[in-house]
Amino acid sequence: MVQSPFYRQIREEYEAFLHASAAQLSADELIRIDLHCHDHNSNVPDELWGRLLRLPETWLKTDELTAALARANTDLVTVTNHNNARSCWALRDAGEVVLSAAEFTCHFPGDDLSIHVLTYGFDQEQEQELELLRHDIYAFCAYARHHDLPTVLPHPLFFYTHGRAVDPDVLERFAVLFERFEVLNGQRGYWQNLLTLRWVESLTPERIDAYARKHGLNPLDYCREPYRKRMTGGSDDHNGLFAGRCGTLLEIPDLQERLAQGASLVELALEALRCGRMAPYGFVGEEEKLTTTFLDYFAQVVLNIDDPGLLRMLLHKGELKDKLICLGLSNALQELKRHKYTLLFLETFHQALKGRKPKLLVSLGVSREFKPTLKLIKQIARTQRKEPERFPEMLREAIPALHHQISDTFFRRVHDQLERIDSRQLGELALDELIALCELPSHFRALIGSQRSSAREMSQVDLGRLLDQLTFPALSAGVLAGAAFASTQVLYSNRGFLNRLAEQLDSVRHPQRVLWLTDTLVDRNGVSSVLRETLSELQRHDLPIDLLVCHPTLEPQPHLHVLRPVTSFTFSQFGEQSVHLPNLLDVQRLFEQGSYDRILCSTELCMGAIALYLKKAYSVPAWFYMHTDWLEFINRKTRLSEHAQDRIRRLFRAFYQQYDGIFVLNDDHYDWLTGSGMELPAERIRLTAHWSGCDKPLPALDSEAGGAPVLLYVGRLSEEKGVFELPAIWQQIRTQRPEVRLRIAGSGNAEQALRRLMPEAEFLGWVETSEMDGLYRAADLLLLPSRFDTFGCVILEAMSCALPTLAYNCKGPKSVIKHGVSGFLVEDAQALAATALAYLNDPALQRQMRQNAYARSRDYRPETILPRLLADMGIGAEPALAAPLQ
């Protein structure tokens, strides 16, 4: 998978920093310690949902944590649980050497801002005082300074704002209150850690003094050496998977000699923390590291959750919405515990992460289709046990592979079950029947049992029977995808803050790049044609947009990513359109490694849902490019009731409202989306346009047809395109001009019927783009009897070859054609035939109209349209280039 220059650059810069920092210390005078790790005593989470569900942050036992730290070759143990040091005291009472510590949640008085503060070296009496003071961060830090207790601000760019947007100015107070910052957090990515490093490096004495004056703070009240900022590292491990593999190197002069003289390792570590030299060590948390952490945590939640109690949840502090969500989660988790195969998978995976291979009975009991999954889990266990240094690399490949294998099984079973539900394939159902599957009965017995719903236009799928076969692969794939989503969402939940900070620092700015998702690119339809031409322009000008399509055989190109499908569905209702479903984790990795920061989507099917997934996961803006009027399509292709069509409208409204903006191709769609039916804010709707791929000089204006006038139709041969109006129109024209010929370029399910109705017409079938110029030049007039087209690319294609168009006065055509100048707009079929006759009978009008049509095509240029599209998505362009079309 191609990695962007930014993706490589931030890794190289940060790894160089780690290497240089460690090289400045004396290798034989170092204490290696993980200053940030947790065990089961972190049992009261900061997050409301965790408290509502009565879930600890981890179930990790203290001895399992210390064993993990020992395997990672740390020299000294500390446990930084939330707001308590119980594990440290238990270890000390057991005779272990341990540095007392805790991660206190501290609050800024009078402000909706909370931060974590790592604090070391206190006794039990001081712990109680710190617990009381943590509700006032200024008093807390002053107390720690007075008692010479070292503090570290962990993950400085990630803090709790309780839903309030925070300006980077909040970091000014951090700069005054702390002298040690965690610049390597094992659960954060390269960008966040490098940005933290660059911010700490920017804290000059002059800047710190300016911040102190601005906020009325005295740095000496909180710091021993306020102008000497030091940097630490910690794994932030909660599961024992990565404990000790990130941490801090503390330099102790004459370390061995002082230990031999009886010095305490704890006191030496505190001495180094207070005033010594130190450097972070270890590896940064790529996305798969946090994904694994969430996956393991979720497995333990399912294995260990108890009923949190309905009344307790309802009476707990918090919004009703959060309580209802947690009620649903609780029921889902309790239901999961009933599925033994899913539980077995989660337990086996959890043990594998600890390095324990699956039990013999598990191996013997696994069905053939899940043998590859078990083999992969065994490889994870073996790597953790025998090659721990390769464990992160192994996870990077194993997690997407696991998801792919389980998803493949899931979709195979989906296909099998759908075939049993109806003897016909899903793609062969009538469109009315297919849409009926979009509604589910509200009666639970009809939904999950054998009782059928009495309602019309209602799915009769027995979900109970369906889920019997799909439960394990569906739940397992869902758990993997959910863990990937949660980990990414945590990493990028404050993306806006990070972007503003990078801009202030003028360093580590994330590139502005668009990933354009589509379900179609090489199919025989107008959307594919437009996107192929767009791809050519992106390649020609190297614009910051890349297309992504899922396809089984298409090869990648510059500015085009191609993912292989996990499964495919073919729908004859949409002209044999195939929908290919990619591995969701492959899409996520591509988005991360491509360093994209915004999304554009062209299709409402699979990629539409994936676009919204990426938007939520990465906290990036997403836009939708509306090519097709699906409500008009459904209205013309089905006999659905008004109620059923209204339901579809509501579905589309819910879908479009999730996007930050919608690009439309005509004024009618703009008015529809902003009207009472869809209710989208006008500021979120943007007008755009297509362009013609032809860039040739004005052709000769005489018809090449050899005498007899030629009318041309170009497009898909299907009912919604209005093609069944062509026989009557042509017949009316031929009553006065019998020599007029009709050529039809295109294919579709209406072709045979049209051949019977117009046996004398010339049916050319699908014509490749490279041959269309000659077809347009040999014609006298393009007929477009469709009221369905949102733009009508064929209009521009014809215009660029000096061929005018005769169309209905609606949607796309009226946005492009200037009536009576570059083409004609009429209201009905009779007017269309009459106008064609008048045009064919006036050679002077034909010559003038051809010139005007060609001139109008020059108004639609990619050099104007694409910069405007980028500008509407927040990527700057020259004002002249971003001007609207006239």
Image: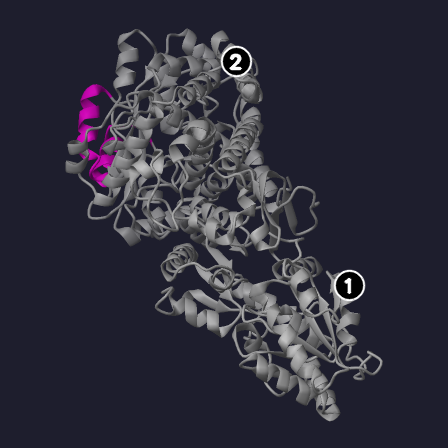
Q: Classify the position of the N terminus by image quarter.
A: top right
Q: Residue 429: x, y in percent?
A: 52, 47
Crowd around label 2: few <14 · some 14–19 · many ≥20 (10 Å): some
Q: Which residue is mark 1?
A: 770
Most foreground residue, 318 or 40: 318
Q: Is residue 188 magenta?
A: no
Q: Earlier in the sequence, mark 1 or mark 2?
A: 2
Region rendered in magenta: 123-151
- Going 63% across and 76% down the picture, which residue do you hit? 728
Mark 2: amino acid: Arg
Most foreground residue, 3 or 232: 3
Q: Is residue 253 shown to the viewer in this render?
A: no
- Going 50% across and 53% down the picture, which residue do you hit? 431
Q: Residue 591: x, y in percent?
A: 55, 44
Determine whether, in the image, residue 40 is placed left or right of residue 799: left
Q: Is residue 541 above or below residue 343?
A: below
Q: Is residue 461 above or below residue 19?
A: below
Q: Residue 69: x, y in percent?
A: 43, 16
Q: Which residue is mark 2?
A: 385
Q: Residue 29: x, y in percent?
A: 49, 18
Determine whether, in the image, residue 413 is placed left or right of residue 753: left
Q: CA distance from mark 1 to mark 2?
A: 59 Å
Crowd around label 1: few <14 · some 14–19 · many ≥20 (10 Å): few
Image quadrant assignment for residue 881: bottom right
Tell me the SS state at disc 1: helix
Q: Is residue 34 above or below residue 443?
A: above
Mark 1: amino acid: Ser
Q: Is residue 587 shown to the viewer in this render?
A: yes
